[in-house]
Image (cartoon, rainbow, N blue to C red):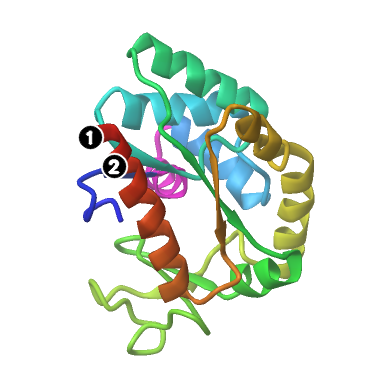
Amino acid sequence: MAEEFDLEHASTGNMFRQAVSEDSGLGEKVRSWLDAGKLVPDELTARVVGELVLERWQSFILDGFPRTIPQAEMLDGMLREREQSLDAVLYFDLEEETAIERLTGRLVCKECGENYHRLFMPARRCGVCDRCGGELSVRTDSSKEVVRDRLAEYDEKTRPLVPYYERRGLLRRVDASQGPDAVSRETRALLTGLTARQQT
């Protein structure tokens, strides 16, 4: 979607993994939270997004941020400083048990960070990345226990963003229980509508 609409794809998950791989002080802080299966604290997440996205790009899709009301407020402040605002917030709506099934099958390439799923998006060769030939491994945040803990934390900290953005007229719902092609079509239609609105 980012390529199709000429936007930078800013995934906090990928940025966190990049920071960890660089063994910086920031990366060590991020690693300790990810390995415990906990959400990275608001201030630390905002620092990563601010330095690696907002300071570098004008047009982007934020993927996985904000995750809490304080993060949303920090994002609002950072965007105001740049005289920008959000165009929309896409909410991928999914039942908890389906989310657990999807999250526990995730794999990641140790070399390039490409993501796979055992059932829904397998590599062509078992355990080998299609893109670079690197070894695939289970993500540290994909065990059932870690996933259930994260979903409980999601209910407490992230779900309140739904009414927060609904009140501002920014929330757009996508039925994420559908297959990937249907979800892509629905997402594409929403982004096309937003692009058309910006051009009028």
**Residue located farthest toward the front when viewing the structure as drawn:** 200
- Whether the residues at callouts 2 and 1 have beta carbons within 8 Å, the answer is yes
**Residue at the spot 41% in from the left edge and 12% down from the top edge:** 80
Question: Does residue 75 sit above or below 177 in this rendering?
Answer: above
Q: Neighbour class for label 1 at 10 Å: few (<14), some, many (≥20)?
A: few
Name the kind of residue labelled 2 in the image: Thr
Q: Position of residue 42 (x, y in %)?
A: 60, 28
**Residue at the spot 31% in from the left edge and 63% down from the top edge:** 111
Q: Is residue 109 visible?
A: no
**Residue located farthest toward the top when viewing the structure as drawn:** 81
Name the kind of residue labelled 1 in the image: Gln
Q: Which residue is mark 1?
A: 199
Question: Does residue 127 sit above or below 189 in this rendering?
Answer: below
Give the structural element (helix, strand or loop) at label 1.
Answer: helix
Q: Which residue is mark 2?
A: 195
Find the distance from the CA under tag 2 to the CA under tag 1.
6 Å
Picture quarter containing residue 85? top left
Q: Bounds of the magenta span?
A: 11-24
Question: Does residue 84 sit above or below 149 in this rendering?
Answer: above
Q: Is residue 127 visible?
A: yes
Q: Is residue 48 left or right of residue 175?
A: left
Q: Main secondary structure of the magenta part?
A: helix
Picture quarter containing residue 116? bottom left
